[in-house]
Image: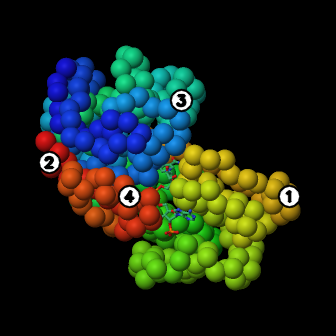
Amino acid sequence: MTTVAALAAPSATEPLIRTTVERRELGPHDVLIDIKYAGICHSDIHTVRGDWGPVPYPLTPGHEIAGIVAAVGSEVTTRKVGDRVGVGCLVNSCRECEQCLAGQEQDCLNGSVGTYASKDRDGTITQGGYSSQVVVNDAFTLLIPDSLELDVAAPLLCAGITTYSPLRRWGAGPGKKVAVIGLGGLGHMAVQLAHALGAEVTVLSQSLKKQEDGLKLGADHYYATSDETTFQDLKGSFDLIINTVSAKIPLDDYLRLVKPHGAMVCVGAPGEPLELNIFSLIGGAKALAGSNIGGIPETQEMLDFCAEHGIGAQIEVIDADQVNDAYERVLASDVRYRFVIDVSTIG
Ligand code: NAP
Ligand code: ZN
């Protein structure tokens, strides 16, 4: 075991503190990564604060990891020292089931292993990317294209793939009208990706405060959901709505904005249940779906797509001392549009 510098939450209610975590010795298929940047995803906050249920403490979050390969195990052929790599929300899966073989490791029938707060196949609890180094099986590392800086690439490993995957699955492209609810970390990626895929993009935000940014990111239209007329004006407008909101929203109101035979996909994951009147789906034969990050092959495809289209996250780089303030700003929807920790400031 190697001891490395990390930030960790001692409990659901205390601030994150500087500490250390243990990393396993390099196995034959492992890669040791010197982490350079780690994005702060709203899921880190939900997890640390117990919104989704009990978790083990101390807990080091972080599943938007970008860094450089420092060492490789004896059997590793696909990665070499010096490679620019990323790690997202997954660090292991069975690799034998139907889902894993289809490149949908996040849906592993035998249970995928999350980058933190998850029991790995060796029985240890995983600890995430707010730390100076991590050891990961090579199959769960992604290559970051040279044209993407590591800091703007880090958030792509979760916010990027979580929005790219449903946009692709539900056919965002030329001739399609796509709305994105919430212009935060996921939302600002959804806008850029849907625009690059050729869709006509509308942002549905709580206010018009971020309108200028939204239009610059590629949105064609921008509406405030605090304005009642938005829900009248946009009735039946969208082929696809991507809901990135971290809190409970009135699903029925938003489903009225979906065209007949269109779909609303929820990626936002509040701890409390959302209410639904089933007639919101029956009238117009609409679909309501969810989506969970994306598999490893699709994550690589997304990174290559971002490089090809010059897409990265809009970030505010912070040092370790600012992480607890950053959490409060994310909770207050005061993020433009992803906080990224400069990991060199942890140790
Ligand atoms: P974020 O940066 O905080 O963005 C969420 C946005 O939602 C906010 O910027 C805000 O946008 C809007 N919002 C927040 N509270 C709201 C409220 N009470 N009513 C209406 N709108 C509200 O968070 P994120 O990192 O993008 O993550 C968003 C959600 O996705 C979280 O629940 C996270 O856990 C989840 N997530 C899911 C997956 C998955 O695989 N499904 C992956 C990653 C994250 P405006 O200011 O524009 O209104
Ligand atoms: Zn995330």
Q: Which residue is mark 3?
A: 108
Element type at mark 4: helix
x, y percentage for residue 62?
34, 43
Q: Does 217 appear above or below 303?
A: below
User: Between 3 and 106, which is closer to the camera in this rendering?
Assistant: 3
Element type at mark 1: helix
Q: Residue at x 21, y 40 (%)?
A: 18
Q: Which mark is residue 344?
A: 2
Q: Which residue is mark 4?
A: 328
Q: Earlier in the sequence, mark 4 or mark 3?
A: 3
Q: CA distance from mark 1 to mark 3?
A: 33 Å
Q: Residues within 10 Å of mark 2 (few under 14, many from 20)?
A: some
Foreground label between 4 and 1: 4
Q: Residue at x 57, y 50 (%)?
A: 270
x, y percentage for residue 300?
39, 47
Amino acid identity at mark 4? Glu
Residues at marks 2 and 3 touching, judged by CB atoms closer than 8 Å: no
Foreground label between 1 and 3: 1
Q: Quadrant of residue 248?
A: bottom right
Q: Residue furthest top?
A: 122
